[in-house]
Amino acid sequence: MNPTVIGKLTSIPSVTRYAGNPVLTAGQVPYPTALVFNAGVTKFQGKYVMVFRNDHGSIEQETLEPHSSTDLGLAYSDDGIHWNVQPKPCFKLHDEEIIRAYDPRLTVIDGRCYMCFAVDTKHGIRGGIAVTDDFEHFDILSLSTPDLRNMVLFPEKIGGLYTRLERPFTVYSRGGMDRFDTWISRSPDLRFWGQSDLLLAVEQVAFSNDKVGPGAPPIKTDKGWLTTFHAVDVDPSRGKNGWEPSWKKRYSAGIMLLDLENPSRIIGLSNRPLLASEALYETDGGFRNDVIFPGGMILEDNGEVKIYYGAADTVECLATAHVDDLVRACLEDEA
């Protein structure tokens, strides 16, 4: 069954792309790499910190090395715009079972930095959680069973429990189709997870016909948890749209507002994308064009929200908006 074609998408008008985008490219990394994207970004110990996905290969030849060459790079910034990439990767997993770790998300809880990440293994995709105080030493707290990924943590306990968003690969229960939804789970200790509920289904998002999943870790506002997500639509008529022979998907960023005390309740959801593919670095010349994936969101003291996102699975970019405008975008369709 072919999905309903979504058509043209545009971003929320109150969101502004940084004029100097992208803020991080492979050329800024002092060791071999081809793609730097899908970064986790947070403020930690007085600095902006970015942990980015780093895929080795050749931009000129449009080729990638085996998945096992993927690692996570580290960069620091004083302003959240200009980044100093560290001389070596900060995190890599690879053994007889684990192929690679990728797609990091950073959340500071009680003064420590927690990193969620995806893990490709020979027996499926797993989601991991690690904690670090220096980005040199990581203590892995948990690895999920297959197939689970795109996990993000809330920055504080809610109702006495840690809370995370996640995207299972529920192929069998969704009729063998690409229908992957966003779920929410709780934990007493960040190691054992349960009390899981469906949070956001594909059918609830007007600009998705394929899958929806977590984006950046949520930020707290007086109106609710401001929460990004990724939304994917498929158009069978799309052809070569990047390095691969065929790329029929488009990734957009969405935004919703969750109840502060019960984040399994959506109190607002924008019916248009937070960010849709519009800029050249999002639509052309990338590994997979028309891909926007939000991985970091920081609320500044002046109300500005910095939104970090991977573009075309190739570079890392920045957009900004005022927090009140983002909350309004979530609620305007609910009035």
Image (cartoon, helix red, strand yellow):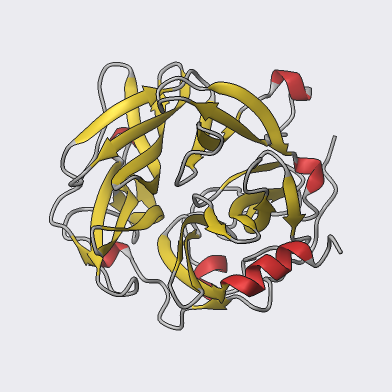
**Picture coordinates of residue 199 (x, y %)?**
70, 37
For this view, does 195 lie left or right of residue 70?
right
Please give the name of the residue rendered at 37% of the width and 24% of the height, measured from the top-left corner: 142
Q: From the viewer's side, name the closer residue of 144 and 225.
A: 225
**Picture coordinates of residue 266 (x, y %)?**
73, 47
Please give the name of the residue rendered at 72% of the width and 42% of the height, measured from the top-left corner: 265
Q: From the viewer's side, name the closer residue of 44 and 30.
A: 44
Q: Tell me, yes or no, if residue 30 can be seen here.
A: yes
Rendered position, 96 above or below 37: above
Position of the N terminus by quadrant: top right
In the orientation shown, which residue stands out farthest toward the bottom?
A: 19
Please give the name of the residue rendered at 52% of the width and 36% of the height, measured from the top-left corner: 164
Please give the name of the residue rendered at 83% of the width and 40% of the height, measured from the top-left corner: 2
Instruction: Report which quarter residue 114 is drawn in.
Output: top left
For this view, does 243 lie left or right of residue 107?
right
Instruction: Report which quarter residue 270 is drawn in.
Output: bottom right
**Picture coordinates of residue 86 (x, y %)?**
16, 58
For this view, does 250 lie left or right of residue 186?
right
**Picture coordinates of residue 47 (x, y %)?**
25, 64
In the orientation shown, which residue stands out farthest toward the front?
A: 160
